[in-house]
Image: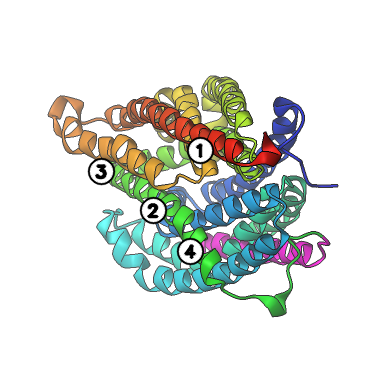
């Protein structure tokens, strides 16, 4: 009763049924993450707030490659589910879940041992560095359950189930908030308490999603004794997931460079930037629900051979993400000062946060439509192409911008740093549209040939 058949019926209605629970679950996850920032900002001070906020881009840099692999698993499950290939779904589920454990253990080792060195390279201020290092080390001890949850949730979403991941996030997030308050306010554990609360909540989320998959009766049922790396499935996951993950890494790398540029302006700007990023996150994850919808819907229809629905799916997702991004972005800007005051009562921090919101959040719909085009291409099975376009069009342009325009004295401001985002979104989106047209024509020609050669389809 949780699955959605994306290959038949009205696209908009089913896309909303898929995207809205996913949107709520992502927003809830951010609310619980924002609780980390709010509790730290209110009860531990600006240094601790800057420490937690400044590690976000670095954590993304280290985890995005493995999150990308979960995208590869999701695409394969969607495709095999659409084509009714239960055996292939079974193999993909068991390969993906074992891969999540291996990836998590590897990340734990790297994150704990390299945290301080990387933070130094990012030019973290001396008063922030020890706190940021502590936060990262504790955080990465809980990274394995986080990846288990992400892979498990991606499997559920691949068959159209976005409701149960929402329930699990509600429970684990509530636990996160309770332990935040306990560890920071009562036990005075500062940033270590926030990181520990996050790790505990991730363990609960991982348990719930594994338990759900084990109790399934469909082809996505998980049996722990059958966990196994199937080489052919792993190759498929890597073919789609590695470019997606590498793209995420490069995006995060460009954000690390931008974060390093922001760090030059001191802890007040860092704190305001961190608070604004959290507010932007609510807009981004709401739009990202339509990116994931595009991936799942296109994958299932491609697997089912219904390539004529792909254009309609893509256009529907673009319209939805444009409306959501524009409306929520303007809303976040209008109420920006009030929202920023939740994170800090410092007027300087609030002003620094509004500088970022005035440039990025009001243009965020551009990021959403760019991501939907990436999702459509990945759903068809093309992952390298959007990776290359995104690396050059988005990340490359941002790095070039920081290396050239930002270095000019009169342009050495935070506003100029932030302008690199909307400029790169526009150029990258237009390039993705061209790539999509080329790929779709190729897919249509392939479909026409298959129909003409198969008597049962003519």
How far apart, in angstroms, are the residues tagged by discs 3 and 4? 43 Å
Considering only vertical position in the picture, is 235 above or below 252? below
Q: Which mark is residue 246?
A: 2
Kindly indicate whether the residue at mark 3 contacts the one at mark 1 (C-beta within 8 angstroms).
no
Asked which secondary structure carries label 4, the reply is: helix
Residue 244 x %, y %: 44, 50
Residue 345 x %, y %: 51, 36
Give the camera-side residue of 389 and 327.
389
Asked which secondary structure carries label 2, the reply is: helix
Residue at left offset 42%, top offset 27%: 433
Which residue bears the numbered disc 3? 264
Which residue bears the numbered disc 4? 235
Q: Which residue lies furthest to the right in this view?
A: 1
Foreground mark, 3 or 2, reads 2
Packing grade of label 1 (10 A; few <14, some 14-19, many >=20) is few
Q: Residue 446 carries which label?
A: 1
Indicate yes or no whether the magenta region holds residue 325: no
| Most common SS among magenta residues | helix
Packing grade of label 4 (10 A; few <14, some 14-19, many >=20) is few
Packing grade of label 3 (10 A; few <14, some 14-19, many >=20) is some
Query: Range of the magenta residues?
Result: 188-217
How far apart, in angstroms, are the residues tagged by discs 1 and 4? 23 Å
Foreground mark, 2 or 1, reads 1
How far apart, in angstroms, are the residues tagged by discs 1 and 3? 53 Å
């Amino acid at each position: 009763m949780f699955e959605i058949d994306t290959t038949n019926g009205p696209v908009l209605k089913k896309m909303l049924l898929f995207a809205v629970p996913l949107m709520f679950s992502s927003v809830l996850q951010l609310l619980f993450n924002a609780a980390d920032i709010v509790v730290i900002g209110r009860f531990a001070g600006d240094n601790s707030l800057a420490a937690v906020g400044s590690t976000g881009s670095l954590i993304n840099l280290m985890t995005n490659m493995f999150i990308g692999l979960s995208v590869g698993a999701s695409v394969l499950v969607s495709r095999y589910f659409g084509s009714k290939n239960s055996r292939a779904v079974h193999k993909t589920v068991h390969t993906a879940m074992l891969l999540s454990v291996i990836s998590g253990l590897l990340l734990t080792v790297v994150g704990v041992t390299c945290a301080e060195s990387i933070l130094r390279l990012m030019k973290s201020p001396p008063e922030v560095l020890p706190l940021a290092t502590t936060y990262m080390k504790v955080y990465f001890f809980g990274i394995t359950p986080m990846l288990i949850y992400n892979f498990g949730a991606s499997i559920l979403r691949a068959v159209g189930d976005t409701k149960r991941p929402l329930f699990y996030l509600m429970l684990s997030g509530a636990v996160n908030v309770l332990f935040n308050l306990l560890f920071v306010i009562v036990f005075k554990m500062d940033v270590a308490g926030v990181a520990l609360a996050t790790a505990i909540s991730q363990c609960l989320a991982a348990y719930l999603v594994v338990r759900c998959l084990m109790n399934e009766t469909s082809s996505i049922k998980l049996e722990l004794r059958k966990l196994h790396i199937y080489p052919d499935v792993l190759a498929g996951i890597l073919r789609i997931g590695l470019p997606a993950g590498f793209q995420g890494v490069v995006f995060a790398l460009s954000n690390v460079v931008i974060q390093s540029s922001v760090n030059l302006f001191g802890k007040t700007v860092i704190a305001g930037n961190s608070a604004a990023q959290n507010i932007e996150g609510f807009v981004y994850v709401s739009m990202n629900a339509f990116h994931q919808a595009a991936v799942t819907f296109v994958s299932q229809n491609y697997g089912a051979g219904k390539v004529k629905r792909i254009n309609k799916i893509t256009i529907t997702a673009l319209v939805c993400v444009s409306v959501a991004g524009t409306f929520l972005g303007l809303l976040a800007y209008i109420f920006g000062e009030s929202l920023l005051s939740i994170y800090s009562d410092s007027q300087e921090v609030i002003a620094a946060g509004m500088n970022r919101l005035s440039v990025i959040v009001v243009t965020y719909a551009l990021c959403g439509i760019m991501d939907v085009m990436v999702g459509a291409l990945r759903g068809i099975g093309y992952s390298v192409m959007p990776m290359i376009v995104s690396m050059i069009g988005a990340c490359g342009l941002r790095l070039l911008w920081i290396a050239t325009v930002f270095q000019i004295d009169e342009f050495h401001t935070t506003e100029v740093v932030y302008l690199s985002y909307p400029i790169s979104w526009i150029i990258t989106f237009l390039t993705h549209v061209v790539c999509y047209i080329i790929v779709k024509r190729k897919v249509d020609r392939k479909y026409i040939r298959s129909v003409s050669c198969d008597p049962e389809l003519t």
